[in-house]
Image: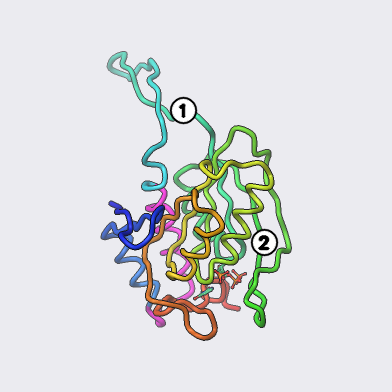
């Protein structure tokens, strides 16, 4: 279950009850690190259903133990999952659980504490030709990290329509910034929160995702 946002174009809110339930558990400050990580992975799995809704299939002839039949299998471009480190990795684990044959790249970014701008420390991508990409990061706050990561993909030659961005919680400021830079990339998020605070944290949000996952 998902709906288009009324506030922003190219923003899909994944409002499935299971996703919303798990997100609420994640938001609670009493949720343990282990539970937080597990819930993030589970939401990554569930959101994958929505992101892949329009994937094409073609029929193949198969034989069950009982009879011959035509079955549907995925066709078209293969998928590469690209988490933005660190927090994106735990969510991408869920995506990979559903699509175990997908390839995975990594983009390592952290937000400079003073400037709040992303600092790049690692890019590792498989060949991009004839593939589509799911960029994964639980937090879309100022949008700087997501926009930077998407630019890395496009400068490697990936067309914007071959990129989808999976975020868990988004701030309106981040969606706006991301779509200013990448208007054609669809953002899928479980929640569009209220705002950013003075430290550029999402309100109400869930705190620092990387710290809650890794205990830093
Ligand atoms: C978090 C989050 C995003 C970024 C979002 O990462 O995982 O990558 O902040 O903020 P932005 O939209 O304002 O750029 P962080 O920089 O804390 O790094 P970490 O995941 O390694 O902890
Ligand atoms: N990064 C996080 O992990 N949380 C926020 O609220 C903002 C950026």
Q: Which residue is mark 2?
A: 108
Q: Does the numbered disc 2 mark a residue whose Cβ is under 8 Å from ligand 1? A: yes
Residue 184 in view (yes/no)? yes
Left or right of residue 125: residue 95: left
199, above or below 146, in the image: below
- Tell me the SS state at disc 1: loop
First in sequence: mark 1 or mark 2? 1
* Quarter placement of the C terminus: bottom right
Colour convention of the picture: rainbow
Query: Residue 87, which numbered label?
Result: none
Q: Viewer-proximal residue, 39 or 54?
A: 54
Q: Could you tell me residue 198's position as x and y percent?
A: 52, 86
Residue 33 location, x and y as percent? 48, 74
* Measured Cα–Cα span from mark 1 to mark 2: 30 Å
Region rendered in magenta: 28-48
Q: Residue furthest bottom?
A: 198
Q: Which residue is mark 1?
A: 75
Which is more toward the observer, 166 or 44? 166
- For image coordinates 41% across by 47% down, the residue present is 51
The residue located at (73%, 63%) in the rendering is 121
User: What predominant SS class does the magenta segment belong to?
Assistant: helix
Label 2 crowding class (10 Å Cα cut-off): few <14, some 14-19, many 20+?
some
């Amino acid at each position: 279950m998902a709906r288009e946002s009324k506030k922003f174009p190219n923003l899909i809110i994944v409002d499935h009850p299971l996703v919303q339930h798990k997100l609420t558990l994640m938001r609670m400050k009493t949720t343990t690190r282990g539970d937080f990580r597990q819930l993030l992975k589970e939401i990554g799995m569930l959101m994958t259903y929505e992101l892949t809704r329009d994937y094409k299939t073609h029929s193949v002839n198969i034989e069950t133990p009982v009879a011959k039949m035509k079955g549907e299998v995925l066709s078209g471009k293969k998928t590469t999952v690209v988490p933005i480190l660190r927090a994106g990795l735990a969510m991408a684990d869920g995506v990979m659980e559903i699509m175990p044959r997908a390839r995975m790249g990594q983009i390592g970014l952290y937000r400079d504490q003073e400037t709040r701008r992303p600092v790049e420390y690692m890019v590792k991508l498989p060949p991009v030709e004839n593939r589509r990409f799911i960029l994964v990061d639980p937090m879309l706050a100022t949008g700087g990290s997501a926009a930077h990561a998407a630019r890395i993909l496009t400068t490697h030659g990936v067309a914007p329509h071959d990129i989808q961005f999976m975020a868990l919680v988004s701030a309106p400021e981040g969606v706006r910034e991301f779509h200013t830079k990448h208007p054609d990339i669809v953002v899928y998020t479980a929640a569009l929160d209220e705002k950013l605070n003075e430290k550029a944290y999402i309100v109400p949000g869930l705190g620092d995702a990387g710290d809650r996952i890794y205990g830093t």
